[in-house]
Image (spheres, rainbow, N blue to C red):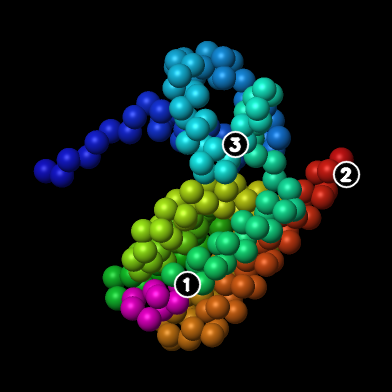
C-alpha cells in the first residue's frame, strides 16, 4: 500500500479560501477578517493565519501592514504580468512535451478534451474549468525542472482565478477554448513546434485581453 499523508488543517483551510477566491465568492480587493473567517469555518485563528500565509505565497492575498489581509486585486498590471509569465513557462514545457510525448500522454489529453466537449454541451462550466486546468497541467509532465514546477504551483491558483473569470463571459469563450485545445493537440501530434507556440501565444494574449476588458467593465459600474 502507498502511504498518502492527509492534508493538514492549514492546507484544507487554504484550499477552501482559494476556491472562494477563484469562484469569486471572495472578491478582488476584499478584506479577509481573520476572526470572522475563523468563526465561519469553525477553526482556530492560527489556522486562518497560516492558511493566509500560504495564499500570500500563491499571490491570491496581499498583507498590508497595519491594515490587514486583502484578496489580491485583479488589475491590468497583475493580469498582464501573470499571462506573460505563464506563456514563457507553458511555451517551454509545451515544446518539451511536443518533442517527447508518449502514446499514453496523448490518450490522456484526448480523453480530457472529449470530457470537456461533453461539459460544453451540458453547460457544465465548473467541471469544464476543472478539466481545463487538468489538461494544461498535463503538459507539465515533461518540465523536469524543480524551479519551474515550484513557480507553476505558486502561479496556478491565480491562473485558475483568471481562467474562470474568462469562461464566465459566455459560451463563445468556452467554444473558443475548445478550438484552441483541439489545435494545440493537433500541433503536438504533428510535432509542429512553430504552430504550437503560435497557438499558445494567441490564446494567452486573447484571454489576457478578455480579462482586462472584464476588469475595465467592472470599474465603470
Mark closest to the chain's N terminus, 2 or 1: 1
Give the residue pinned by disc 1: 92
User: Is residue 13 shown above or below 193?
Assistant: above
| Residue 171 screen position, x and y as percent | 66, 57
Q: Mainly helix, strand or loop, the magenta region?
A: helix
Secondary element type, mark 3: strand
Is residue 50 positioned above or below 205 on the image? above
Residue depicted at x 61% and y 56%: 82
Magenta residue span:
94-101
For the residues labelled 2 and 1, say whether their Cβ atoms are less than 8 Å apart.
no
Q: Which residue is mark 2?
A: 220
Instruction: Specify whether residue 35 is in view.
Output: yes
User: Which residue is at the far left?
Assistant: 1
Residue extending furthest toward the right = 220
Along the line of sight, the residue nearer the viewer: 184 or 3: 3
Q: Which residue is mark 3?
A: 61
Whether residue 85 appears in magenta in the rendering, the answer is no
Between 55 and 100, the one nearer to me in the picture: 55
Cα separation, mark 1 vs mark 3, equals 28 Å
Q: Position of residue 114 (x, y in %)?
A: 45, 64
Amino acid at each position: 500500500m502507498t502511504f498518502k499523508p492527509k492534508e493538514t488543517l492549514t492546507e484544507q483551510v487554504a484550499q477552501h479560501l482559494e476556491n472562494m477566491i477563484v469562484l469569486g465568492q471572495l472578491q478582488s480587493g476584499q478584506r479577509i477578517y481573520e476572526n470572522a473567517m475563523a468563526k465561519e469555518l469553525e477553526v482556530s485563528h492560527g489556522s486562518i493565519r497560516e492558511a493566509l500565509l500560504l495564499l500570500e505565497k500563491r499571490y491570491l492575498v496581499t498583507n498590508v501592514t497595519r491594515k490587514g489581509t486583502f484578496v489580491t486585486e485583479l488589475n491590468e498590471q497583475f493580469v498582464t504580468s501573470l499571462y506573460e509569465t505563464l506563456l514563457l513557462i507553458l511555451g517551454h514545457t509545451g515544446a518539451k512535451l511536443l518533442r517527447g510525448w508518449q502514446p499514453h500522454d496523448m490518450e490522456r489529453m484526448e480523453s480530457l478534451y472529449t470530457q470537456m466537449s461533453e461539459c460544453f454541451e451540458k453547460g457544465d462550466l465548473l467541471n469544464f474549468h476543472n478539466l481545463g486546468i487538468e489538461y494544461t497541467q498535463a503538459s507539465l509532465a515533461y518540465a523536469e525542472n524543480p524551479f519551474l514546477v515550484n513557480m507553476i504551483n505558486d502561479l496556478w491558483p491565480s491562473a485558475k482565478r483568471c481562467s474562470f473569470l474568462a469562461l464566465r463571459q459566455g459560451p463563445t469563450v468556452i467554444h473558443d477554448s475548445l478550438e484552441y485545445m483541439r489545435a494545440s493537440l493537433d500541433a503536438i501530434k504533428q510535432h509542429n513546434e512553430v504552430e504550437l507556440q503560435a497557438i499558445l501565444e494567441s490564446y494567452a494574449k486573447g484571454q489576457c485581453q478578455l480579462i482586462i476588458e472584464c476588469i475595465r467593465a467592472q470599474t465603470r459600474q
